[in-house]
Image (cartoon, rainbow, N blue to C red):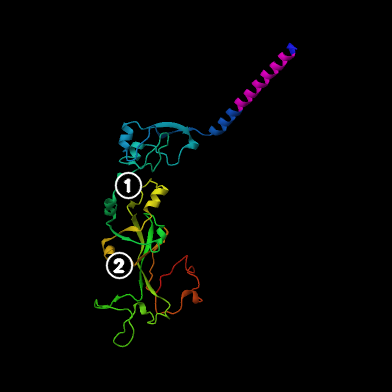
Amino acid sequence: MNSRRTVILVVAVVVGAIASFGLLNYIRNVEGSVYENAEPETVWVVQRPIAKGTSIDQVLNQGLIGESEIPASFRPATAIVDPETELAGLVAVTDLPANAPLVTGNFVAPSVVNTGITDRLEERGLTTVTFSLDQVKGAAYLLEPGDRVNVLSLKALGELVVATGGTEIDAEADSEDGSSESTGSADADAGTRAYDYDARYVYQNVEILAIDKSLTPDLGESTDEQETAARNGGMITLAVPPEAVQLILSVGTENLYLSLVPPSYEPYELPPLDLGDQVLPGENGDELTPYSDLEAPTPAP
């Protein structure tokens, strides 16, 4: 009986040894496949956390980064080779965690990180114009700082208009020759005319600098949902040249309407509508859809 147990024990030991040997070979084969044709290369990595705004001189002096070897296949394409030269005069764009490889974009010019609102405007010679809009006129508050919008002026045809010479007259008032005065040659009979409002493009592709008190995030920053919800109000600040501020205020901020456009939007000429036209686009066989000229908008004559 004892000899049988001894045989079983010996067999178990042999099987275990074979399994261990097989596992060792498997691990070596996996390692070999990972490092096959992958010569180790030196990269710079963050040794200790680096705070946003830390200069590269401080980083080097304090030993916050160091060299490390990794397989060539794992080396980032934008890895920094010589931080002292490539990052000279730059600062960390955001907090950098330990063990992160140092790549292009981790460090930027100090102005990108530290710039305030006045500095941002000064760089391009711009000023601000601020106004409040409700959700309908403010694109349902879907706007974000940094977005681009078309700015329109929306006025009812029955509102007072300024005649030549600066005298205010009623849009429906009769002129001396018996004809009725109205904006855009609209029909004097409000019951039959096709248009009740005069919508005009004030400016196209205008930059939103801020919504409420939230500015466009700095490069590398992100905002959480709570911050986004807090700033989705109706106080909107545009970044425009000084003469544009004058014109926008002259149009009347209470008449403004914002239309969100994509980053690829290219402004083109959009003359005033002929408000005397009694045919709407959907009633015209040549203009049934607004998307007919979507790929290549052609300026109106």
Which stretch is magenta? 4-25
Residue type marked 1: Val
Quadrant showing the C terminus: bottom left
Residue type marked 2: Gly
Residue 266 covered by magenta stretch = no
Instruction: Identify the residue under disc 2.
Output: 252
Of label 1 and label 2, which has the lower sequence position?
A: 1
On residue 112, the disc is: 1
On residue 25, the disc is: none
The residue under the point 29% across, 63% down is 244
For label 2, the crowd category at 10 Å Cα-Cα, with few meaning under 14, some 14 to 19 and many 20 or more, is few
Residue 21 covered by magenta stretch = yes
**245 relative to 279, above or below:** above
Question: Please, what secondary structure does the residue beneath circle 2 have?
Answer: loop
**83 relative to 147, above or below:** above
The residue under the point 33% across, 38% down is 85
